[in-house]
Image (cartoon, rainbow, N blue to C red):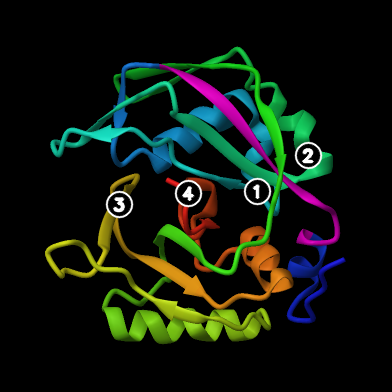
Amino acid sequence: MLVTQNSSTQTSEIDLPHVELSFGVVGKTLPADQGYGLYSSIVHICPEVHSLQGISIQTITGFPDKQGKIYLSDYSRLRIRLPVDQIPIVYRLAGKSLKIGVHSIHLGIPKVFMLNPAPKLKARIVVIKGFQDPEPFLEAARRQLQALEITGSVNIPTHATGEIDRKVIKIKRYSVVGFGLEIADLSEEDSLKLQILGIGGKRKMGCGIFIPGGEP
């Protein structure tokens, strides 16, 4: 069992095994910036999600059109990570339709996967309140890892153009700045702990969720 001494909340989050539910997605398009809309649509069907601890909702992947939309494919999935005893709460999403802005999708029956350790994990976006510049952000990320007693090398990836992976997302009327993040040289225990706890905020809106480095 993984244990951390930083807070009773964090300890309770990792007392139970965590799993990832992967729902097939049928639809045509979604907003590229979908985190808040996806979360709101899920809460409409499963209101308990709003108050659940230890749950992460990953944004749905697709092919970007570079104009604010993504096109869904046969490989698009809604992935929700949560303690095993909370599966029945979100399983109600199976077979349901979600409306996100003007876009609609239909969810299939989920498959359930255990989390597996990997020495390198990546997050599409991490948001740490008050840190919008790369160097202070990296230092804040390192402090959060240290508080969780996780050891690893931390890096903001760059695009092919050499620009750092900086992102801006909308939450209600507000713009929030975050960065992609890679953490390498993780032990098996630290890798699982990071996948369960994440770092930063807004993990129900697709932020601060780490997956093995080779995954899309």
Residues at marks 3 and 2, CA–CA distance in whole angstroms? 28 Å
Asked if the residue at tag 1 contacts the one at tag 2, i.e. Cβ–Cβ closer than 8 Å, the answer is yes
From the image, tell me which residue sits under label 2: 86
Asked if the residue at tag 4 contacts the one at tag 3, i.e. Cβ–Cβ closer than 8 Å, the answer is no
Task: Name the residue type under label 4.
Answer: Glu
Q: Quadrant of the N terminus?
A: bottom right
Q: Secondary structure at mark 1?
A: loop
Determine which of the numbered discs, if any, sits on residue 169 in the image. 3
Going from N to C along the chain, the mark reached first, 1 or 3, is 1
Q: Residues within 10 Å of mark 2 (few under 14, many from 20)?
A: some
| Above or below 110: residue 155 | below
Asked if the residue at tag 2 contacts the one at tag 3, i.e. Cβ–Cβ closer than 8 Å, the answer is no
Say which of marks 2 and 4 sits in front: 4
In the image, residue 17 lies in the stretch drawn in magenta: yes
Q: 176 and 212: which one is in front?
A: 212
**Most common SS among magenta residues:** strand
From the image, tell me which residue sits under label 4: 215
Asked if the residue at tag 4 contacts the one at tag 1, i.e. Cβ–Cβ closer than 8 Å, the answer is no
* Rendering coords of residue 94 (x, y %): 64, 18
Per the rendered image, the range of residues in magenta is 13-26
Q: Residue at x 49, y 28 (%)?
A: 41
Going from N to C along the chain, the mark reached first, 2 or 1, is 1
Tell me the quarter of the picture where residue 4 sits: bottom right
From the image, tell me which residue sits under label 1: 55
Q: Residue at x 69, y 63 (%)?
A: 192
Say which of marks 3 and 4 sits in front: 4
Residues at marks 1 and 3, CA–CA distance in whole angstroms? 20 Å
Task: Name the residue type under label 2.
Answer: Gln
